[in-house]
Amino acid sequence: MWERVITGLLRFIFRGLSNRRPVQDMESYDKEMVKSILLVMTTGIGDTLLSTPAVSTIRASFPDKIIGVLYHSRNRDLLIYNEDIDIFIEYPGKGKKVLRVVRELRKHKFDVAIVLHGNDPDILPLAYLSGAKHIIGNCNSKFNFLLSKGVPAKDLVRHTIEHRLESAKVIGANQFVYAMKLNIPYEQHLEAENFLKKHALLNCRLIGFVPVGSNYRNRWPCEYFSRLGDLLYEYDRSLRILVFGGKSDHEIISEVADRMSIKPVCLNGSLSLIKTAAILNRCDVVISNDTGLLHMAIALKVPVIAIYGAASPRLTGPYKCSSWNVSLRKVDSDCDIDEVCFNNSCGTVKCLRNILPRQVFDIIKREFLENL
């Protein structure tokens, strides 16, 4: 309730402000006059990485422009080593330290602001307060009156990367990049090597499991991950399994590990994102639900088997990748869905239970283990 009240109040305030200082329409836009571009991506790990092709596209199309990014503070590691970006501005979260963020945005005098992905109600107002003359974002936003050009909301046809590139096209980008980018500095590679040494994993073939996810309808059953781990150990005792997740995923990670006959090494959010990425990068193959760590693996060009339930790999799966990957999804014949399942009351998740551990093992054995 309070969020609706606050959003309504913000709409009232910013309608008044925009009447006094309207955002310029795209007819007045001249890309030759642009000196600096602000890109906004303030959501989760996966969405941040899915926005990096748009960042790379804008850099390739505007090599002499200054590019700044407003990003969520928890995702700093994903972007801070990206050479396409010149200016980094932290977004601490909805409604937090607003004056500091606005001062930082205005200091850089951005000409254009593009909201690639941001769910919080203060995102478009912040873009407006940056002073940018032209603002591009989701036309379905409650603050769409602050837009110079509205981009249609994500549909169920195009991949998310393609959708984000539409915003880059609005400002005249024409050198398109489709690969996600996640750079790891040399010292973090050394940290990963020390971690593997500590756990006697340095010269082992490593299989990464990512059994976590934001919604149970996107999580392959824990017992399936455990059974897959046992099948892999039975096939090759020299294999080692790493189970990845965040601090809030302790129960899921523990359940997977406890059910396995030989215990894996568990990384449950105790390491930074960049250290986790460096260790993920050492895996020979990663089996993952649709979650941020999946997109990290794809960005790092690690071979992946992506397991999908409610979401669709056509929209968020591996896209135009140079690395080996397989996306698995088995929609049950009883389910009346097209691309994405919106049935929040589903208690069976047959689409996930239809993907059996033996089937995933056979793919790993055929496509990966037998080729090493």
Image (cartoon, rainbow, N blue to C red):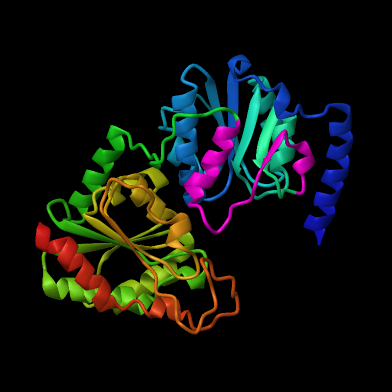
User: Is residue 150 covered in magenta?
Assistant: yes
Residue at 71% x, 40% y: name it: 124
**Residue visible at 28% across and 33% down in the picture:** 186
Q: Position of residue 283 (x, y in %)?
A: 24, 53
Q: Is residue 333 above or below residue 316?
A: below
Question: Magenta region: which residues?
Answer: 142-170
Given residues 148 and 229, the one toward you in this image is: 148
- Inspect this view and state whether residue 106 appears: yes
Q: Quadrant of the C terminus?
A: bottom left
- Residue 101 lies in quadrant: top right
Q: Nearer the viewer, residue 291 or 253?
A: 291
Residue situated in front as seen by the camera: 54 or 290: 54
- Does 104 sit above or below residue 189? above
Residue 187 sits inside the magenta stretch = no
* Place of residue 88 in the rendered image (x, y in percent of width and height, measured from the top left): 53, 30
Task: Say left or right for 215 vs 228.
Answer: right
In the picture, measured across the screen, residue 8 lies left or right of residue 255, that is: right
Foreground of the two, 139 or 202: 139
* Quarter that holds the N terminus: bottom right
Residue 70 visible? The answer is no
